[in-house]
Image: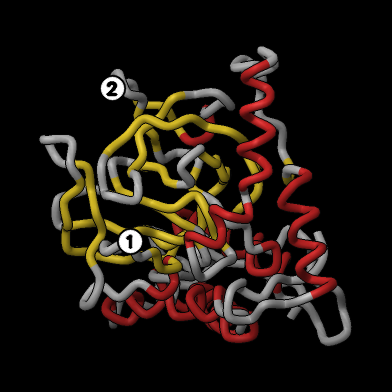
């Protein structure tokens, strides 16, 4: 199952002309496969992908929309080639189910105190942005580090849309605010139980019900860290931390980065024009490897794929 071959011939007549409804079973990727992959069950995704592409080959041959379907399969084929390997073979490191980045989508935005919108991908160290404090007040805070940045690689995201129309995309293990000083990993959010919190017109955060939760692949991600450990992304309250069950523990773990940033401020060493380079910051890399080697802390940290 290491490579899926998609060869569609237009010689035959369109097989769905007699039964147009049957095409509906092919044109939508089964989201269950993606959700299972985020939980480590990649085999379910690979089975879904193989079934999907075989269905498309047999149902769309000779159809008017054949070329459109062929183009829509490009990402699925690329993903399956990276993640679906034969037994005993090593999985491609670029498979997003293995890499499991803990980030925001580059296309989402943060807001500065003066109202300017800045995409996550363009945030710089020293930038002033809006966040919330422990008392749920909207405050101005500062970007102190970019823990992980990739502008080309794919990642799986949970995209939340609230009843107020606000939207935020987070990787599965990223913490998001659900009220009462509680943060929950994106993959565990239930729209029937939880609410998200958005910045209201009076500059206070307000609860909003969740209209929908979608699982999707996106290109590019980044993990900006602020002094307060929180960030308003598209006006939705979120933690800056992931791969951990408790926001407060994550904030404690990042204390050395805050100290380093404060020292740089004192000596005027903050460079706001510095560009973001692809890769993982040395500090979370070292922290992850130490935790993985010494103590797994199963009740605190999400299981990692190993040393990075």
Return the x and y of residue 5 as percentages of the image width and height.
69, 70
Q: Disc 1 on helix, strand or loop?
A: loop
* Classed neighbour count for the residue bearing mark 2: other residues with Cα under 10 Å, few (<14), some (14–19), many (≥20): few
Q: Work out which residue is located at the far left of the displayed protein and give it.
A: 202
Residue occupying the point 65% across, 44% down? 147
* Classed neighbour count for the residue bearing mark 1: other residues with Cα under 10 Å, few (<14), some (14–19), many (≥20): few
N-terminal of the pair, mark 1 or mark 2, is: 2
The C terminus - image quarter: bottom right
Residue occupying the point 66% across, 19% down? 274
Return the x and y of residue 26 as percentages of the image width and height.
42, 75
Which residue has dot 1 on it? Answer: 181
Q: How many marks?
A: 2
Return the x and y of residue 18 as percentages of the image width and height.
29, 81
* 84 shown above or below 77: below
Residue occupying the point 28% across, 76% down? 20
- The reply to whether residue 90 is in sight is yes
Is residue 241 or residue 260 the one in the foreground? 260
Give the CA separation, mark 1 to mark 2: 26 Å
Image quarter of residue 170:
bottom left
* 300 shown above or below 258: below
Which residue has dot 2 on it? Answer: 115
**Contact (Cβ within 8 Å) of mark 1 with mark 2:** no
- The reply to whether residue 151 is in sight is no
Is residue 198 or residue 1 the one in the foreground? 198
Residue occupying the point 74% across, 61% down? 288
On residue 268, the disc is: none
* 144 shown above or below 154: above
Image quarter of residue 96:
bottom right
Is residue 26 or residue 188 the one in the foreground? 188
Q: Is residue 17 left or right of residue 186?
A: left
Return the x and y of residue 168 as percentages of the image width and height.
35, 51
Q: Which one is closest to the eye, mark 1 or mark 2?
A: 1
């Amino acid at each position: 199952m290491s490579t899926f071959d998609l060869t569609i011939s237009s010689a035959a007549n369109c097989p769905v002309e007699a039964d147009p409804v049957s095409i509906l079973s092919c044109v939508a990727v089964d989201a269950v496969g993606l959700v299972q992959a985020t939980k480590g069950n990649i085999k379910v995704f690979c089975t879904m992908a193989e079934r999907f592409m075989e269905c498309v080959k047999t149902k769309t041959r000779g159809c008017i929309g054949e070329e459109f379907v062929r183009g829509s399969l490009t990402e699925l084929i690329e993903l399956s080639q990276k993640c679906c390997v034969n037994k005993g073979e090593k999985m491609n490191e670029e498979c997003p189910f293995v890499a499991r980045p803990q980030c925001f989508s580059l296309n989402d935005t943060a807001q500065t105190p003066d109202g300017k919108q800045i995409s996550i991908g363009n945030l710089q160290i020293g930038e002033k942005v809006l966040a919330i404090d422990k008392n749920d007040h909207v405050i101005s805070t500062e970007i102190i580090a970019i823990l992980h940045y990739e502008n080309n690689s794919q990642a799986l995201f949970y995209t939340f849309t609230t009843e107020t129309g606000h939207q935020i995309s987070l990787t599965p293990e990223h913490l998001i605010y659900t009220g009462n000083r509680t943060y929950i990993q994106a993959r565990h959010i239930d729209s029937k139980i939880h609410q998200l919190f958005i910045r209201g017109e009076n500059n206070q955060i307000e609860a909003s019900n969740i209209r929908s939760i979608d699982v999707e692949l996106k290109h590019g991600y980044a993990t900006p860290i602020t002094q307060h450990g929180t960030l308003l992304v598209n006006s939705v309250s979120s933690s800056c931390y992931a791969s951990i069950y408790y926001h407060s523990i994550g904030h404690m773990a990042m204390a050395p980065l805050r100290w380093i940033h404060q020292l740089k401020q004192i000596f005027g060493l903050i460079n706001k024009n510095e560009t973001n380079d692809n890769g993982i910051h040395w500090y979370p890399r070292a922290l992850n490897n130490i935790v993985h080697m010494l103590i797994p802390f199963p009740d605190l940290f999400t299981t990692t794929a190993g040393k990075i």
